[in-house]
Image: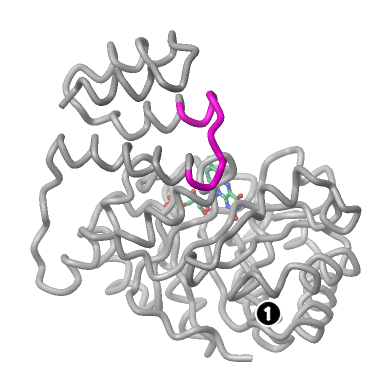
Amino acid sequence: MKFLRLNSKVILAPMAGITNLPFRLLCLEYGAAAVFTEMVSADALAMGNRNSFSLAQTDALEKPVGLQLFSSNADNLVKAAEMMQKDFDFIDINMGCSVAKVLKQQAGAYLLKNPARVAQIITKVSDAIDIPLTVKIRSGFNSVNAVEIAQIAENNGAAALTIHPRTAMQGFSGDADWDIIKKVKENIDIPIIGNGDIKDAPDAARMLDKTGCDYIMIGRAARGNPFIFRQVNEYLDDGKIIAQTNAQKIADFMRYFELAEKFNLMSLNDIKTKAQQFTRTLPDSCRLRREIAALNDIKKIKELITELN
Ligand SMILES: Cc1cc2nc3c(=O)[nH]c(=O)nc-3n(C[C@H](O)[C@H](O)[C@H](O)COP(=O)(O)O)c2cc1C
């Protein structure tokens, strides 16, 4: 099945603990072409774990959105994908996560060590669902095999592939090797989403230009900064960088707060973290960070940020 036709080039990366429903909606409002949920355990969904369903919370307003699943078990991936597909525009399988908790389950980037398992999973899940299946990979586990894995993905039914070109063993060290994105793109016909180290709009344009990838994906640079999607789209259109004012950064946090309230997703921890992330580039942000950390009441955090105006 073909991937979706997206309205712009720039996609929000899945980020555990960050890309919840209100944050994703805000990124879509700012022009993200598509968004992904954070990784959700297909094993836990298949067992009916309530907490995992809340990580997969979406809304009819949220479009296009992909549900990212992780597991090493093809049957659980099939079960979870079949169960959840009605609420999503595509399903993504995480074959890139390198955190110990996921590798211990032989999931995430661990799968890159086993191309036969990759083929089996992609075949089974793509056959089972009526929406596109995508996969997100790293360049390899401890050595690079991205082109081989991407070919397997394409030949077995994946509609698009995201690549973050660092090996799992590299974690986030060193630079993302954009030449690997280029190699994958040259060898594959399905749309390629390039990811890794895009810090600003000119980086986004450079990745498109250097690698020929179809779409670009932004992770860390979007934390507390959904405005980056408007900047990238504008820059790709006319080469101009729109500056973001401090007032806009505060307004963005307020909009996040409003959406979190609307969808009943207010937690002290999340509001604290988001308040710190959204205000990270304001003047005197170190002091502000400490002040936010010391507050134990969501309303007080909102008041503190409102008073910055
Ligand atoms: C806090 C955090 C959480 C992440 N969680 C996920 C995840 O749930 N699924 C996934 O595929 N990648 C996850 N990633 C990786 C990102 O999607 C992305 O591939 C990586 O950060 C490189 O892109 P960037 O340089 O734009 O940040 C996470 C990254 C960070 C920093």
Q: Position of residue 206 (x, y in %)?
A: 26, 66
Could you tell me which quadrant the C terminus lies in?
top left
Q: Is residue 43 magenta?
A: no
Q: Quadrant of residue 209?
A: bottom left
User: Where is mark 1, residue-wise?
Assistant: 153
The magenta segment is: 262-271
Depth check: 232 or 268 in front? Answer: 268
Q: Position of residue 24 (x, y in %)?
A: 46, 54
Q: Is residue 120 left or right of residue 240?
A: right
Q: Is residue 128 left or right of residue 139?
A: right
Q: Is residue 268 magenta?
A: yes
Q: Position of residue 144 (x, y in %)?
A: 61, 62
Residue at horizontal 53%, vertical 65%? Answer: 163
Instruction: Please name the amino acid that badge 1 sits on.
Output: Ala
Q: Is residue 46 left or right of residue 101?
A: right
Residue at horizontal 27%, vertical 53%? Answer: 228
Residue at horizontal 75%, vertical 82%? Answer: 129
Seen in the picture, residue 67 relative to 269 is either above or below; the reply is below
Residue count near mark 1 (Cα–Cα under 10 Å), binned few <14, some 14–19, many ≥20: many
Depth check: 167 or 206 in front? Answer: 206
